[in-house]
Image (cartoon, grey):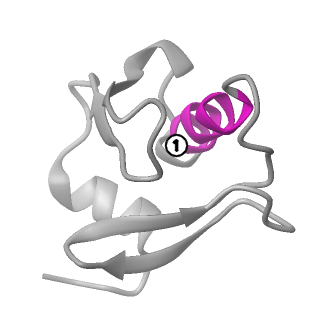
Amino acid sequence: MPNAKKSEVIGVLDDALKIRLHAQPIEGKANEALLRYLADALGVPKSAVTITHGHTSKRKMIEITASQLTPESVRSALLPGTSQ
């Protein structure tokens, strides 16, 4: 969701992570903000985060290439206080 007051993870909706972004959906600014937000939240370089599908859609598929990350560590970084 672009144009939010601040960038933050809202939660899981329909089996997808919902994230608000403090960026406009113009000229790829929201996509860049998403990559930067995820890289910062996960402690990986921005080059390790790639949008693989949905560049022009609100629903995107993201690939994160970082050997130190596990699904559990990503979940705890992006959704603190949840467990599975």
Instruction: Indicate the quadrant where residue 12 lies.
Output: bottom left
Whether the magenta-drawn stretch holds residue 36 is answered as: yes
In this rendering, the answer to whether 70 lies above or below 68 is below
Question: Of residues 32 and 44, which is closer to you in this image?
Answer: 32
Q: Percent from the top left, x then y, of residue 70?
A: 18, 46
- In the orientation shown, which residue stands out farthest toward the right? 5
Q: Is residue 75 left or right of residue 50?
A: left
Task: Give the image quarter of residue 74.
Answer: bottom left
Disc 1 crowd, CA 10 A, few/some/many (<14, 14-19, 20+): many
Counting from the top left corner in percent of width and height, residue 55 is at: 44, 29
Mark 1 lies on a secondary structure that is helix
| Residue to which mark 1 is pinned | 38
| x, y percent for residue 13 | 32, 80
Residue flagged by tag 1: what amino acid is it? Answer: Leu
| Labels in figure, total | 1
Locate residue 4 relative to residue 77 in the image: left or right. Answer: right
Residue under the image location 40 percent in, 19 percent down: 48
User: Residue 1's spot in the image, x, y percent?
Assistant: 61, 62
Residue positioned 40% across, 86% down in the render: 81
Q: Say whether residue 47 is left or right of residue 67.
A: right
Q: Residue furthest left?
A: 84
Q: Main secondary structure of the magenta part?
A: helix
- Give the quarter of the image for residue 33: top right
Q: Nearer the viewer, residue 33 or 44?
A: 33
Residue 47, above or below 18: above
Q: Specify start and end residues of the magenta stretch as a single range.
A: 29-40
65 in the magenta segment: no
